[in-house]
Amino acid sequence: MVLKIDKNKCLSCAGCVSICPKDALTLKNMVLEVDENKCIECDICTRFCPVNALRLTTNL
Ligand code: SF4
Ligand code: SF4
């Protein structure tokens, strides 16, 4: 699984950045990025995001 970011939905609120237990999310110039080497696919950020901009999906 990989974390997919819908950049058209993301509001750059940084909430997911704050709650990620592995510091896998960062905002760079207000654009959200995920470090797939840090992400443990815990699903916390996907459930938190108020606009459903995040989802875990297969890497196919
Ligand atoms: S919580 Fe959602 S809207 Fe906020 S920065 Fe993360 S992905 Fe974007
Ligand atoms: S799935 Fe978990 S570890 Fe991965 S970016 Fe979201 S909150 Fe962080």
Image (cartoon, rainbow, N blue to C red):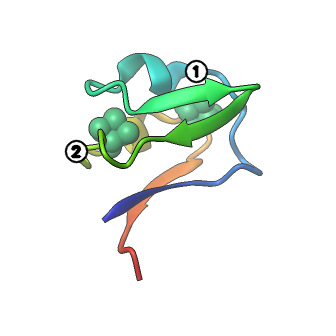
Q: Amino acid at mark 1?
A: Ala
Mark 2: C-beta under 8 Å from nearest atom of ligand 2? yes
Residue 6 in sight? yes
Is 25 located above or below residue 14 in the figure? below
Residue visible at 26% across and 24% down?
21
Mark 1 = which residue?
Answer: 14
Image quarter hosting the N terminus: bottom left
Front of the two marks 2 and 1 = 2
Is 55 located above or below residue 9 in the figure? below
Residue 8 position, x and y percent, is 77, 51
Q: Which mark is residue 2?
A: none
Q: Is residue 8 left or right of residue 46?
A: right
Q: Residues within 10 Å of mark 1 (few under 14, many from 20)?
A: some
Mark 2 = which residue?
Answer: 40
- Please, what secondary structure does the residue beneath circle 2 have? loop
Residue 54 position, x and y percent, is 51, 49
- Please, what secondary structure does the residue beneath circle 1 have? loop
Residue visible at 39% across and 74% down?
59
Residue 20 position, x and y percent, is 34, 26
